[in-house]
Image (tube, rainbow, N blue to C red):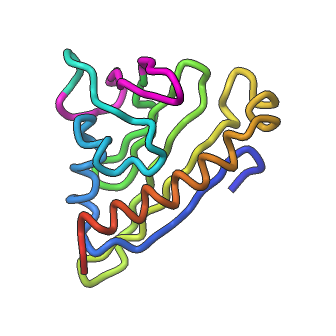
Amino acid sequence: MGSRQVSRTAIVAAPPEKIFGLLADPAQHPLIDGSGTVRAAQSGGPDRLTLGAKFGMDMKIGASYKILNTVVEFEEGRLIAWRHFNGHRWRWRLEPVGDGRTEVTETFDWSTAKFPLAISLSPFPRKNAEGIEKTLARLGQLFPA
């Protein structure tokens, strides 16, 4: 993990394909969001994400806003990442660990951002790490052992 990334990992009691199906469906993102900022997928976007797909989300941090994302990394059942307008990425890596379980790693990566120093100096890395921990916990609750 680089110095401009924060990641957390958890074991989830589901195979990678099931978890990936949830991640590749923008309408499901509010179910797992631990940050409390993701409200809903915007209409008109894809039902299932693929490399290069663009999808909008309704968000709220204090005030409501909309954000457009582009899928920039994609390996079916294993890896998906999307980029915001500033270039930072949200990445999900899935590794099977046996017995139908998966090691899930979520990463907030601002090394690709247009202004990475500004993000480094902001509270976002710490807050996003906390949100990732809560997101992974919510994901685990959707697939109880």
Q: Looking at this view, is 8 or 99 the one in front?
A: 8
The spot of residue 116 in percent (x, y) is 75, 30
Q: Quadrant of residue 123?
A: top right
Above/below status of 89 relative to 138 = above
Q: Is residue 60 left or right of residue 102?
A: right
The spot of residue 104 in percent (x, y) is 42, 63
Q: Quadrant of residue 85?
A: top right
Main SS of residues in magenta: strand
* Farthest residue, direction bottom: 99
Above/below status of 112 relative to 144 = above
Q: Looking at this view, is 59 or 48 the one in front?
A: 59
The segment highlighted magenta reads: 47-68
Q: Residue at x 81, y 30 (%)?
A: 117
Q: Residue at x 38, y 41 (%)?
A: 74
The quarter of the image holding the C terminus is: bottom left
Q: Looking at this view, is 56 or 109 the one in front?
A: 56
Q: Is residue 62 a member of the stretch shown in magenta?
A: yes
Q: Residue at x 82, y 36 (%)?
A: 121
